[in-house]
Image: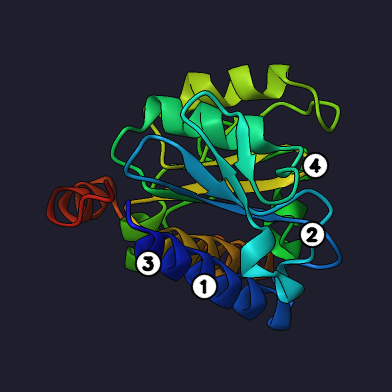
Amino acid sequence: MSRHDDNLLREQIVTHGKSLFDRGLTMGSSGNISVRLDDGGWLMTPTNACLGRLDPARISRLDREGRLLDGDKPTKESFLHMAMYAERPRSQAIVHLHSTHSVAVSCLPDIDTHDCIPPLTAYYVMRVGRLPLVAYHLPGDTALGDAVKGLAGRHSAVLLANHGPVVAGKSLEAAVYATEELEETARLFLLLRGENPRCLTPEQVAELEARFPRD
């Protein structure tokens, strides 16, 4: 990858990070973003960095083994990203947030752990699909990476219990859009609890998945 392309990706991470932060989808120094590079390495947001105030020159660049090449030390949740990428060779970007409504769903005691949010809308099915719950792990516990890896081959997004979503996409834009769709659908799901909403049928879901593959 040329230095020009590398700089462009850094600027895109900064732009999307600020957009997510400004709209309240991440707060403080929570959340992280990564992009896969052509050489097999990654760009990742640094540890303890606010997504609303990223410096493109300080974004971490890692080689294919996860070793830091330049920039600041990467997010301490880099192992989550690498676990997803290991099982999703066509995914080019990952977004992990602690977005309010998605985290709220992850804390509910009675959700379907194999599919946390029902198919309420076509765009949720198209951009997220089935959303499994990953059991709670202590922050920084690398066993969480193994748990994510066990699901990532079959799911482009997972929901970490009492933590938040990890979403992969075929591009950074696609991963961001899917994360936003997940957060809005989580909000709808919470609004509709107890209302017995009309969901898409299995046939409608299958048609969407066949026509609009995610990656």
Residue 162: mark: 4
Q: Identify the residue shown where x is 71% and y is 61%.
A: 99
**Residue at the spot 45% in from the left edge and 37% down from the top edge:** 41
- Work out whether mark 1 precedes mark 4 in sequence or the reverse, and give the earlier one: 1
Residue with the mark numbered 2: 49
Q: Position of residue 87 (x, y in %)?
A: 40, 25
Residue 4 - label:
3
Earlier residue among tags 3 and 2: 3
Left of 151 or right of it: where is 69? right
Position above or below: 161 against 65: below
The label nearer to you, 4 versus 2, is 2
Q: Amino acid at mark 3?
A: His
Q: Position of residue 85 (x, y in %)?
A: 44, 33
Q: Residue at x 48, y 71 (%)?
A: 12
Q: Residues within 10 Å of mark 1 (few under 14, many from 20)?
A: some
Q: Position of residue 212 (x, y in %)?
A: 19, 57
